[in-house]
Amino acid sequence: MRYLPLIWTAVMRKPMRTLLTLLSVAVAFILFGLMFGLNASFDIVVARARADRIFTGARFGNGNGGGIPIAVAHQIAAMPGVKVVTAVNFLPGYVQDSKYSVFLVMLDENARKVVEDWPIPAEVWNALHKDRTGIVMSKIQAARWHKKVGDTFTMISRAVKRADGSNTWTFKILAIGDDLPEQSNGYVLGNYDYIDKAKPLADQGKISEVDLLANDPATATELAQRIDQAFANSATPLNTTTDKMARSSKDFNGLDIKAITRGIALAGMFMVLFLTGNGIAESVRERFAEFATLKTIGFSDRAVTALVVLEAALPCILGAALGVGIAAIMAHQLPGLMPPGFGLPPPTVSPVLMLWAAASAFVVALLSAALPILRLTRMDIASALSGRA
Amino acid sequence: MLRQIWIVSVLNFKSLRSRLWQSMVIVVGLAATIGVMLSMLSVSAGMREAYAKAGDPNRAIVVSKGVDQEGSSAITRAMAPLIAVAPGIAKDKDGKPLADRSLTMGVPVLRKDGTKGNTVMRGFGDKGPGVRPEVKIVAGRMFQPGKREMIAGLGAQMMFQHMQVGDKVILPDGQWPIVGIFTSGDQLEGQLIGDSETLLTALHRANYNSMLVRLASPDSLAALKSALTTNPALSVDVMRHSEWYARVANQQTFALALLGYIVGVVMAIGALFGCLNTMYAAVSTRGREIATLRALGYGAFPVAVSVILEAVLLSVTGALLGAGIAWAFYDGKLDLFGNTIFHLSVSPKQIELGVIWAIVVALLGGLFPSIRAARRPVVEALRAT
């Protein structure tokens, strides 16, 4: 640590060069943070996908408000390989003004078994099915509508009309639940019985989606295809997909997102490697006689190497810290800025990612210092001292 | 003045070799930036080109007023004959107008890699082949009007599973068999085609989505447009098919292109800092040389310009290198986005864009160093080591 002043003077010798290097490294690490953060978000979502969970909805037309007869859910429940089935009805709408949209998911009593991994405690499920006008909001949604437990929540749905002709639906908030990584907009859950009985008689008994668990996760894909085939010639053909398939990162409309983000991050690192390598080589070249002096007074090769590596590492690590920090701030703001339904989750800049960034910065510093260090260890001290090296 | 700039610049470039590695920093920085940006833009550019080819300027499309997607447009049975008799529409050999009633709907399909995808099922009326003569059957046969059967494009066959003659596709009223495979040389090849009337029944729909007409001549569009838009019984928009496709392409590719540009801007900023670094170093290395020139009488302005020119030369070289790499890796590769099958495109227009970006980065990156070079007191510079 007593050699810190040496490193500092080395770095501050050409402050403009150090600053520009640091800024360039920071920019490359903004990309690093955003790109690998995006991959991390995909990984989290994919890891949470259950291999035995399957969703199916109407193959054509919208299932909002109801498009499939509930008998379909019962038929699926009777198919071999199906463990438990829940009927789901969507209630899309808005609060006061049509630009404040909200999406309610109305569930039946089996839902708690199909989404048992959701952070909703048993008492809340019980309350939801006891109080049929009740809803459960996630924290994000509760914050958006400024609601707390016990408040009433009123929304208007153009798609779903009540039996009395009105489009206004009022609910009571029973609980506020934790958010899920795969639902960046939060969730609002309600009671299917309530919405079904409140609709006009002709519209009753219809659902939007069937969610189910397979008996054996290994057969989930085959079961999904079987369900599609079973209803292929019916009045309501279905489109069935497994949880894993729905969350795959290879599937952004056909593009492999992870490969693209990795490529971008690597290109950024390569650009920076060249810059820092050049900077350090130049700095060492300028101070060759200085290093020769250090070696003369007794600095070992190892000490000189350490000095150079630390000098290279300082702008790299600081730049990486700055870049990842900015990336973290941007990742926080992004959900608000991106158009809805864009399809990409917001990047997650986690402490693990920061460690990776620091490690990469160090590797870049090492690689860029490699050749100059080689020169230093091989130098002929006498000619270096005289300035002729 | 120009002669001075020329001489100083040539001197500059001759000494470039002694600053080779620093100069490479700019080249590599721009190569990485433009290479990545053009690679990302190759998807949106390729899609736009695929759509541009699909829109024949001799065709016009008629949709409901104010819609931006064919799926939201509705042409009723009553409107169709009114549109067909409008002026400007070409006639077939029987003297009937080449105006076709068209339907469109999304159909879920399975991609070759097992993931779920979507394609479009298009309805052709009886004038379909007349309005779109580029559609040719290459396997099996054409579907018969009134029958629940369809043909699939060669592109769809390449990208999706179960697209052979004889395979069945699930539609709302059951499964329809594929009886033929067609080519059309444009993005229609990624879609399925069936009979409009039969589809209307199958989908429980009352209205068509659009009408596609063959113009008597490219200039007839004006006559057709004014006739249809001034007809009080109709509320429609009329535009050239190519213009419609350009609009659709822009919608679909907007987000993707935006992403490409954002990444490009971020990397360009990184490259800019590298460029600044190198040019400052270059100017300080050449300190004495520049001072000598100025002492000899060369103006400060030519010196400054020569510095900027050096930056421009290096960055354009880097941009062309990066563009070349992007072109070599990606141009022409077949890709799939949504239901559009297209070739990735790194075209001259894209490369031109890359070069312009490089020039902008060079101008910004060379400006301050060039000012410093021009304003540094000559005597002090002459004394510098």
Image (cartoon, coloured by chain):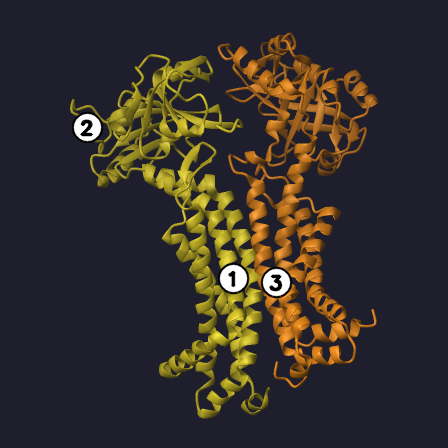
Chain colours: A orange, B yellow
Residue shown at the point (63%, 21%) measured from the top left: A54
Residue shown at the point (51%, 88%) measured from the top left: B291
Residue shown at the point (38%, 30%) measured from the top left: B155
Neighbour class for label 1 at 10 Å: few (<14), some, many (≥20)?
many
Q: Which residue is mark 2?
A: B91
Tell me which amino acid carries mark 1.
Val
B28 or A174, nearer to the observer: B28
| Quarter of the image with the N terminus of chain B in it | bottom left
The quarter of the picture where residue A161 lies is: top right
Identify whether B258 is placed above or below B376: above
Identify whether A78 is placed above or below B213: above
Left-right relation of B32 to B141: right
Neighbour class for label 3 at 10 Å: few (<14), some, many (≥20)?
many
B213 or B362, nearer to the observer: B362
Question: Pointer 3 and pointer 1: residues touching (CB < 8 Å)?
Answer: no
- Callout 3: chain: A
Residue shown at the point (58%, 57%) measured from the top left: A270
Q: Which residue is mark 1?
A: B28
Neighbour class for label 2 at 10 Å: few (<14), some, many (≥20)?
some
